[in-house]
Image (cartoon, rainbow, N blue to C red):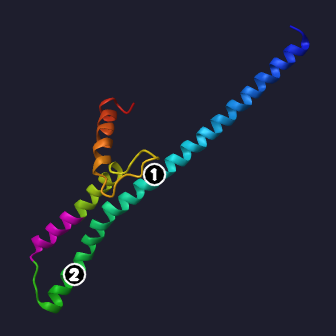
Amino acid sequence: MSAEEIKAAMEEMESRNQMTRTQVVESSTQRSAAAELVSTRILYRILAFAGVPTFSGILLLPLFYVLRVTKGIEIPMWGVYLSQVFFIGGGLLGISYGALSASWDPMRPGSALGVEEFRINLPVIWARIRNGGE
């Protein structure tokens, strides 16, 4: 090989190497944008499925007080406790359901309630638990 051929081969290798770096950066940027989109989707679902029941449970406490003081309606203590367990517990379950019912595919927005996404995502979680997180 002549010196010119070696120089041409080196330049070609360098351009290929530069292209590979560019592709890696673009791929990393796309993955980062997709991860941000999916995590935003999950956050909104958690806020909806956990926030609404929890906030409702918190609003029931003053409502029970107002009913007792202004209307004279006495709600039994077990009823207050039961309502709090139901709503606050529903909020805790809503955290898990919100994360599992979001579409983890950045190209698919998913449905409003996320039942189909939940059926898709739950086996993925179970498989990872069984395989030790791999």
Side (left or right) of 48 relative to 15: left
Give the vertical position of 36 relative to 28 (above or below): below
Residue 130 image offset from top left, x and y in percent? 29, 31
Q: What's the residue at 37%, 62% (across, down)?
A: 47
Q: Is residue 84 above or below residue 106?
A: below
Question: Residue 73 at x, y = what percent?
Answer: 10, 86
User: Which of the two marks, 2 or 1, is nearer to us in this view?
Assistant: 1
Q: In the image, is residue 50 above or below residue 69?
A: above
Q: Residues within 10 Å of mark 2 (few under 14, many from 20)?
A: few
Of all residues, the one furthest to the right in this rendering is 3
Residue 61: x and y, percent? 23, 77
| Element under disc 1 | helix
Task: Decide if residue 7 is on the left or right side of residue 28.
Answer: right
Q: Residue at x 33, y 42 (%)?
A: 121
| Type of the residue with mark 2 | Leu
Helix, strand or loop for disc 2: helix
Callout 2 touching callout 1 (CB < 8 Å): no
Tell me the residue that label 1 is attached to: 39
* Label 1 crowd (10 A; few <14 / some 14-19 / many >=20): some
Seen from the viewer's position, the closer of residues 99 and 64 is 99
Residue 60 versus residue 29: which sits nearer the camera?
Answer: 29
Amino acid at dot 1:
Ser
Query: Residue 102: x, y in percent?
Result: 37, 51
Outermost bottom residue: 70
Front residue of 24/51: it is: 24
Q: Which residues are magenta?
A: 76-87
Residue 15 falls in image quadrant: top right
Q: Which residue is mark 2?
A: 63
Residue 85 colored in magenta in the image: yes
